[in-house]
Amino acid sequence: MNWEIIMALLLGLGLSASCGFRVFVPLLVTAVATHFGWFPGMIHNQFAWMGTLPAIIAFGSASVLEILGYYIPVVDNALDAVASPLAVIAGALLATSVLPIDNDLLKWGLGIIVGGGSAGIVQSGTVFTRLLSSKATLTTGNAVVSTGENVAATAGALLSLILPIITGIAALILVLVMGRYAVKRFRKMKIGES
């Protein structure tokens, strides 16, 4: 595996993990960076549409609605049901879009595993966190959780573009920790049902 692919995987991992916090913010950050050519060659030809003005408007509108929705009690928990599969799709799309691989099967396979997997694991961690916050604070603490997620999504996406190695490694650690936590919670729930 060459250095270019490793860098792209780390970039994709960082962007995808950010999708686990907010689905559309990393897409918006990537679209704006692509549109203005801040990182030439980052997005490959078949994904050039991500840098178009209609894509920026769509991702921007969706980002605003998503961010605002997470500040409304009860709606925030409902959004998690919709955001979970969307995060996996967005993570897979972002990871695939930056991979410099000509073989589409390999490119999409890696994108789905690395991007979709990392976004899904981070999203499941945020769902558990919100459920705990809702239960412990009767939803009054969810705004704090939402603010933290907004910051993590924005900072994660920006830092992924600027410092892909560091952010990718941090995202990998985050995914491993959250994945382990999710497995423990799932096992506890299964034991509780028995």
Image (cartoon, rainbow, N blue to C red):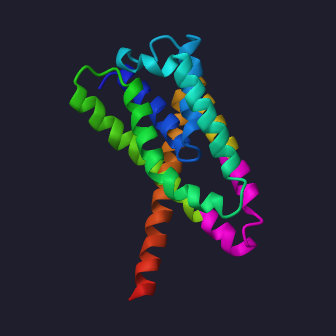
Q: Is residue 116 above or below residue 166?
A: below
**Could you tell me which quadrant the N terminus lies in?**
top left
Q: How many marks?
A: 0
Q: Is residue 107 above or below residue 117?
A: above
Residue segment shown in magenta: 129-149
Q: Position of residue 158 (x, y in %)?
A: 62, 29
Residue found 73% across the figure and 49% down from its top = 147
Q: Is residue 39 above or below residue 191?
A: above
Q: Is residue 119 visible?
A: yes
Residue found 54% across the figure and 21% down from its top = 54
Q: Quadrant of residue 56?
A: top right
Q: Position of residue 13 (x, y in %)?
A: 46, 37
Q: Quadrant of residue 25?
A: top right
Q: Is residue 159 visible?
A: no
Residue found 71% across the figure and 74% down from its top = 136
Q: Position of residue 187 (x, y in %)?
A: 42, 75
| 146 in magenta | yes
> Which one is nearer the viewer's eye here, 67 or 132?
67
Q: Is residue 191 above or below residue 114?
A: below
Residue found 44% across the figure and 19% down from its top = 49
| 141 in magenta | yes
> Which one is nearer the viewer's eye here, 137 or 57?
57
- Say whether residue 117 is left or right of residue 30: left
Q: Farthest residue toward the bottom?
A: 194
**Could you tell me which quadrant the C terminus lies in?**
bottom left
Q: Look at the magenta stretch and give its main secondary structure.
A: helix
> Which one is nearer the viewer's eye here, 79 or 19?
79
